[in-house]
Amino acid sequence: MKGNRIFGALAFCGVVAVANVGAIRPMESTWHLALVKSVPEKDARVESVSEIRLVFSQVPQKKATSIRLLDGAGSVIPLGEVAADATDGKVQVATADAAVPAGTYTVAWRTMSADGHVVRGEYGFSVAAAR
């Protein structure tokens, strides 16, 4: 009898441990800063672009975010200094210095979370020719 209770208790602990691993795993993505949304969005086709707006899962460290806009040839399109949105520090914005002409573009970004974890990425979009 005592052996059955010990085996049952061990089996129960094993089930609880497996269940907890499954419950914790989705939360891992919230532990580190991540890009949640962008404007323009990845693979979007837009008519015009005046700014690049990145929304992160956490507030990045102040002055640690860079946003670069590259044209199809890899040349840098000038953007203003990156600034946090006045109403939400998770939103980082860089405004285009001039009208962005039709073409394909890549947004390359880099930032850092409060714990010092560096995160970077890139995505593409296109600007349609004026009709």
Image (cartoon, helix red, strand yellow):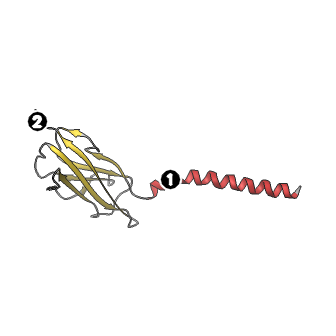
Asked which quadrant contains residue 115, the reply is: bottom left
Q: Secondary structure at mark 1?
A: helix
Q: Is residue 38 left or right of residue 19?
A: left
Q: Which residue position holds label 1?
A: 27
Q: Position of residue 48 (x, y in %)?
A: 16, 41
Give the mark nearest the N terminus, 1 or 2: 1
Q: Residue 127 placed where, x, y %?
A: 17, 41
Residue lying furthest right in this view? 1
Cβ–Cβ under 8 Å for marks 1 and 2: no
The label shown at residue 97 is none
Query: Position of 49 compared to 121: left or right?
Result: left
Which of the two residues, 59 or 18, is positioned nearer the viewer here?
18
Residue 17 in which image quadrant: bottom right
Across and down, in percent, residue 74 comes to 17, 55
The label number, if any, that marks residue 130 in the structure image: 2
Q: Are there few (<14), some (14-19), or many (20+) residues within 10 Å of tag 1?
A: few
Picture quadrant of residue 45 = top left
Q: Tell me which residue sits at (39%, 53%) in the image.
A: 57
